[in-house]
Image (cartoon, rainbow, N blue to C red):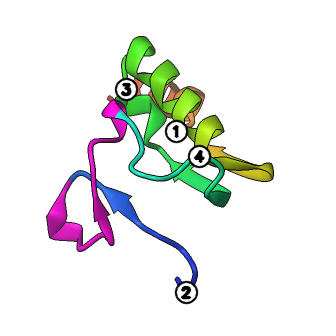
């Protein structure tokens, strides 16, 4: 999408920036107006997750916003229990 920077660890997806987001974000402090992450935080253990969230806060502008989508654990559990 125009104006967005895709960051991913896997270069096969052809992101603009290849980076391990569990180790920090390669952006200046206060550089981002908006951050969007979908299903990523579920892949992190608690300590790297806390580091990732701190980094998001660091790179967001003071009036910036973050949209974080997570998997629906209840849906996955129900699917497993009803139709394993």
Label 4, on which residue?
29
Q: Is residue 21 magenta?
A: yes
Mark 1 is surrounded, within 10 Å at the Cα level, by few (under 14), some (14 to 19) or many (20 or more) other residues, namely few
Q: Position of residue 28 (x, y in %)?
A: 52, 51
Q: Secondary structure at mark 3?
A: loop
Front: mark 3 or 4: 4
Farthest-out residue, left: 12
The residues bearing labels 4 and 1 have C-alpha atoms spaced at a distance of 29 Å
Q: Secondary structure at mark 1?
A: loop
Mark 2 is surrounded, within 10 Å at the Cα level, by few (under 14), some (14 to 19) or many (20 or more) other residues, namely few
The magenta span reads: 10-23
Marked residue nearer the N-terminal end (3 or 1):
3
Label 3, on which residue?
44
Label 1, on which residue?
71
Q: Is 21 on the left-hand or right-hand side of 37?
A: left
Q: Residue at x 57, y 36 (%)?
A: 72
Q: Is 66 on the left-hand or right-hand side of 63?
A: left
Front: mark 3 or 2: 2
The residues bearing labels 3 and 4 have C-alpha atoms spaced at a distance of 22 Å
Label 2, on which residue?
2
Marked residue nearer the N-terminal end (4 or 2):
2
């Amino acid at each position: 999408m125009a104006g967005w920077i895709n960051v991913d660890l896997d270069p096969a997806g052809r992101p603009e920036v290849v980076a391990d987001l569990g180790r920090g974000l390669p952006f200046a402090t206060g550089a981002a107006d908006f951050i969007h992450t979908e299903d990523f935080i579920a892949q992190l253990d608690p300590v790297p997750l806390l580091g990732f969230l701190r980094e998001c806060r660091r790179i967001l502008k003071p009036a910036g916003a973050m949209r974080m989508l997570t998997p629906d654990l209840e849906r996955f559990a129900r699917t497993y229990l009803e139709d394993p």
